Amino acid sequence: MKRKVAIIGGGQTVHASRRHDVNQGEMVNEAVRAALADARMTMDDIDAVLLGNMEFFEGCHLTDCWLADATGAYGKPGLKITTGGTVGATTIVAGAHHIASGLFDRVLCIGFEKQEEGDSSAILSGVAHPLYGRSLAGAAVGYFAMMGASYMQAFGAREEHSAMVAVKARQNARKNPYAHLKLDITIQDVFDSKMLAYPIRLLDMCPTSNGACAMILADEKTALERCEKPVWIRATETAHNEQFELNWRDVTNTGPIFSRVCAEKLYRKLGVENPATFFDVFEVYEPATWAELVWYEDLGLCKRGEGFRMIEEGQTEINGPIPVNPSGGVLSTNCIGASAMLRIWEAALQIRGDAGEHQVPKDVNWALTTAYGGTNWTVMTALSKKWED
């Protein structure tokens, strides 16, 4: 990058299935005010505002325009970004590039979704090709059902392993005051939940959440002058390929390789040889339990077919050697337009040591975040406590 970029502030709303107490603008404004307060800034200090949202889910077009007052964007340059489930991370990447290029010094990035005002499932049902992907239609459950069935057949994992992921996520969320599903559940509770498409049960899937996240990015000069604990954006990477049924029916060869490609390219940028020891915490975008197990392998945290061993041995617990999603992850909170941004903000809180009850019990110097979109768009971001050339 031409200039160094840091996260100098952020904030999020409380997330819930219903936010009847606020309209879209008021909900977004909650996150904006929290971010400004955290950075000890006002809107006068902000050069540009970038807004990320999947507007089709609410059925409201041009949200960047009609929310200009709520976001503080009135009279300022900015962009509206929509890239599916990855939109929150894409917005951060866009903000970082605007600063690194020298165009702006301080950028406010916002991600939100208020799904109670639309029908996300109806929109998602149109993602798949009507002929070649007809068995995938009906939102994302079909994708992950094929992934889970393939994973069990190929590597000998059992349904108990996906249930362990569900329990870990919701128990972590109970420590996060902003999370949506704060559920005190057991493996048996997961088994007792409704079967959606074998082997995916209701508690194997993410919820439909309402909420917002806002983050303030700045150049090196601003970060060092105005922030006590800046978190540096060290590298980003994006990979994208269209999905077809075979991509999900065989996780051994033709399975979702987009995250593997993305991780390999990012690791080359940083010179990472062993990500399991290089990074201190991971915040991954896991819409379903089986996806988290596959993501472990795609990220190089273990060998192919051994992801279920990691959850079985407790390696990815908050107090484990490779903490994954101490915040509760997408399995606990999925306000789509903000979900990927929350991964970055939660990782930044871990580096700052400000995560509260869900802070991992070790010094966090490096963090890796991932974002996932319905058409296999993948965005990864590496953060660090210090900038070391």
Image (tube, rainbow, N blue to C red):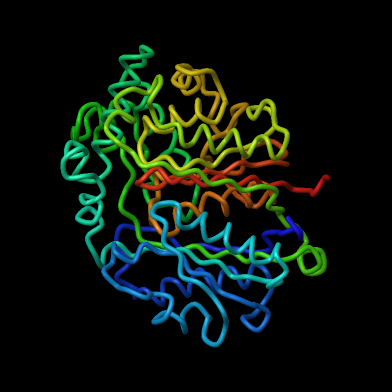
Residue 288, located in which quarter of the rendered image? top left
Identity of the residue drawn at 31% across and 35% down: 204
Q: Is residue 301 left or right of residue 131?
A: right
Q: Is residue 70 left or right of residue 364?
A: left
Q: Is residue 290 left or right of residue 141?
A: right
Q: Does residue 189 appear in the picture of this structure?
A: no
Identity of the residue drawn at 20% across and 37% down: 132
Identity of the residue drawn at 65% across and 78% down: 47
In the rendered image of this protein, does residue 106 appear above or below residue 134? below
In the rendered image of this protein, does residue 106 appear above or below residue 386? below
In the rendered image of this protein, does residue 22 appear above or below residue 194? below
Where, quadrant-wise, is the C terminus in this rendering? Answer: top right
Identity of the residue drawn at 63% across and 72% down: 37
Residue 269, located in which quarter of the rendered image? top right
Where residue 6 sits in the image (x, y, percent)?
A: 71, 59
Where residue 293 sits in the image (x, y, percent)?
A: 43, 27
